[in-house]
């Protein structure tokens, strides 16, 4: 199945005409996009174009002014964050939002405390192994390095057993080894049916992992398509990469 | 939640067993005066633990906790007097229910606030209850209300001991050994992230608030029957909450045993000062000095000396409390 076909066949996430204004700032200004099942969609755009706000709107952290959000066929616009999470949507934050005072293992268990408790200990052990965090399992989360914190936050999303994971710059500023661990985990989870929407500025990562790229600018989706098509798009070159083709 | 190795548990369990045996035999070991001191120390240890449930584990600083202590005391006083004349033990569940209703009514709107705003809202609630109890005839007004005397120090000691032990057992089971505790601590450390993990933070906060309030009401009920006379200031007074806060800070915010350490330490110091100098404001100076010392040298309290791992986020909560609060 091609990337575009995946996106069109009963998408796991569908956003239509999504608006969110903060005073005079139009954070999202009519966003339309879709993420297909088992698809890894990359979301790119210049700083301040509304990517993280879009994540907050989809995950319920912020309520939209107007528009439709459908997750796995259900309308979720305006629903509280915990209810959306329980439907199977997980997210990470641009700045890792860990439970600082809790250990690494406790962070993972806390992610499973609501709705996924049976077998949580075993899954936490498996997640520690998957992300190579076993040696710091009992360390306090705030004592981890920046890269390990990114890994742990990703691990919490894994513990949610979500069908769609929103990743906000999950590999930004991390060591190549940690980046490799995350990318392998994403690929492995996709094989198990998980879909991803990934905000990323690292174009090499976008190219190597994402099936399809969605480009945002000024609160709207400008275009979407395969990586090769996107980099040939002069509008993207001007708005995102800042140079004419 | 990870299981501790058994060998590291034994010294702690042994110490706990020794403390429990000594406490159980206390009436045989000391005279009536020191038995009253021990009864008071157990009450304050339990009250501090009840405050710590919300303030330490959930990170919501409640400056109106005395309101629930007072509610328990007044319900017991009201129901033991004419025309009801209920036995003491029957008044406790009534006080718990009344307190739970008040806690839901007050907690549902105020727990939407954070930091200093929540602290001020809860403080205002306690002030309202002081004024209400002072103005109403059925509460005895500012003059207070008496209870049927029951001069049995051993009864009150064991009542406080049993209630304090149960309070710590519940706190251990719920906050240290259950997924409910994980949810509470998760919302303390990062509320939006906890929500994103599927945790209904509004509900968990309210549950914790009600549990904390109801626990304080039981101590209030026993206290009222013990001292046989209460008035608005003696059970709703802001100094009661202030002492709980300082006790928890001194012992260790968000730890299981910190409130017990702080509660017993400060209450015994209070009684020793009273023995040597009588009624004096010196105790207030001691409280102030304790706050300064904690801020400078023990940001995680005495318990924090032994549990260094839990330092950082609790320091942030303590900073909010000591440093005047603010938005999280």
Image (cartoon, grey):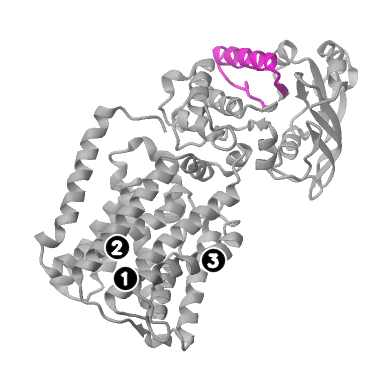
Q: Residues within 10 Å of mark 1 (few under 14, many from 20)?
A: many
Query: Are the residues tagged 1 and 2 within 8 Å (C-beta)?
Result: yes
Which mark sits nearer the N-terminus, 3 or 1? 3
Q: Is residue A192 magenta?
A: yes
Q: Compare residues A152 and B328 and report the one nearer the observer.
A: A152
Say left or right for B63 vs B15.
right
Query: Residue B317: x percent and y percent?
Result: 45, 48
Query: Residue A204: x percent and y percent?
Result: 71, 12
Pointers 3 and 1 within a single chain: yes
Residue B328 in view in this figure: no
Give how far apart the Cα atoms at labels 1 and 2 are. Answer: 8 Å
Query: Residue A167: x percent and y percent?
Result: 67, 26
Name the subunit of mark 3. Answer: B
Which mark sits nearer the N-terminus, 3 or 2? 2
Give how far apart the Cα atoms at labels 3 and 1 are. Answer: 21 Å
Q: Is residue B73 above or below residue A215?
A: below
Tag 2 residue: B43
Determine which quarter of the picture holds residue A236. Answer: top right
Residue at (20, 73) in percent of width and height: B152
Determine which quarter of the picture holds residue A214. Answer: top right
Magenta residues (range): A168-196
Element type where label 3 sits in the image: helix
Name the subunit of mark 1. Answer: B
Residue B39 in view in this figure: yes
Tag 1 residue: B223
Query: Residue A149: x percent and y percent?
Result: 53, 27
Tag 3 residue: B101
Element type where label 1 sits in the image: helix
């Amino acid at each position: 199945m091609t990337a575009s076909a995946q996106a069109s066949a009963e998408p796991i996430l569908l956003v239509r005409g999504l608006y969110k204004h903060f005073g005079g700032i139009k954070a999202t200004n009519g966003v339309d996009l879709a993420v297909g099942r088992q698809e890894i969609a990359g979301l790119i755009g210049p700083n301040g174009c509304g990517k993280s706000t879009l994540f907050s709107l989809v995950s319920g952290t912020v309520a939209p002014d107007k528009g439709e959000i459908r997750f796995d066929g259900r309308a979720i616009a305006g629903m509280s964050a915990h209810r959306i999470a329980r439907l199977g949507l997980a997210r990470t934050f641009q700045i890792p939002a860990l439970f600082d005072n809790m250990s690494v293992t406790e962070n993972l268990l806390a992610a499973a405390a609501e709705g996924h408790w049976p077998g949580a200990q075993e899954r936490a052990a498996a997640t520690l192994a998957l992300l190579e965090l076993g040696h710091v399992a009992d360390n306090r989360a705030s004592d981890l390095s920046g890269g390990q914190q990114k890994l742990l936050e990703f691990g919490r999303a894994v513990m949610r057993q979500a069908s769609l994971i929103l990743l906000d710059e999950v590999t930004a500023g991390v060591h190549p080894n940690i980046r490799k661990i995350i990318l392998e985990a994403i690929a492995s989870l996709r094989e198990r049916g998980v879909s991803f929407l990934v905000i990323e500025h690292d174009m090499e990562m976008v190219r190597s992992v994402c099936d399809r790229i969605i480009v945002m600018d000024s609160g709207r989706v400008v275009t979407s398509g395969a990586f090769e098509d996107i980099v040939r798009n002069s509008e993207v070159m001007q708005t995102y990469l800042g140079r004419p083709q | 939640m990870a299981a501790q190795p058994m060998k590291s548990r034994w010294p702690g369990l042994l110490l706990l067993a020794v403390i429990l045996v000594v406490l159980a035999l206390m009436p045989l070991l000391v005279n009536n005066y020191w038995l009253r001191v021990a009864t008071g120390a157990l009450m304050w240890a339990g009250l501090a633990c009840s405050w710590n449930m919300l303030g330490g584990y959930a990170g919501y600083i409640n400056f109106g906790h005395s309101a629930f202590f007072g509610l328990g005391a007044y319900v017991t006083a009201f129901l033991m007097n004419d025309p009801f004349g209920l036995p003491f033990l029957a008044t406790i569940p009534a006080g718990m229910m009344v307190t739970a209703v008040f806690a839901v009514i007050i907690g549902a709107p105020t727990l939407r606030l954070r930091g200093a705003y929540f602290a001020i809202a809860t403080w205002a609630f306690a002030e309202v209850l002081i004024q209400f109890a002072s103005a109403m005839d059925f509460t005895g007004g500012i003059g207070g209300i008496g209870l049927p005397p029951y001069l049995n120090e051993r009864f009150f000691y064991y009542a406080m001991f049993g209630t304090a032990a149960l309070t710590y057992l519940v706190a251990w089971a719920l906050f240290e050994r259950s997924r409910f505790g994980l949810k509470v601590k998760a919302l303390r450390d990062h509320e939006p992230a906890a929500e994103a993990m599927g945790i209904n933070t509004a509900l968990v906060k309210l549950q914790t608030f009600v549990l904390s309030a109801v626990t304080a009401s039981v101590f209030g009920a026993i206290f009222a029957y013990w001292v046989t006379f209460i008035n608005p200031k003696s059970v709703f007074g802001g100094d009661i909450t202030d002492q709980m806060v300082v006790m928890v800070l001194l012992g260790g915010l968000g730890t299981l045993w910190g409130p017990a350490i702080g509660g017993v330490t400060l209450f015994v110091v209070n009684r020793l000062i009273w023995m040597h100098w009588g009624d004096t404001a010196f105790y207030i100076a001691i409280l102030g000095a304790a706050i300064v010392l904690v801020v400078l040298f023990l940001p995680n309290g005495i318990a924090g000396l032994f549990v260094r791992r839990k330092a950082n986020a609790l320091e942030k909560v303590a900073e909010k409390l000591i440093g005047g609060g603010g938005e999280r």
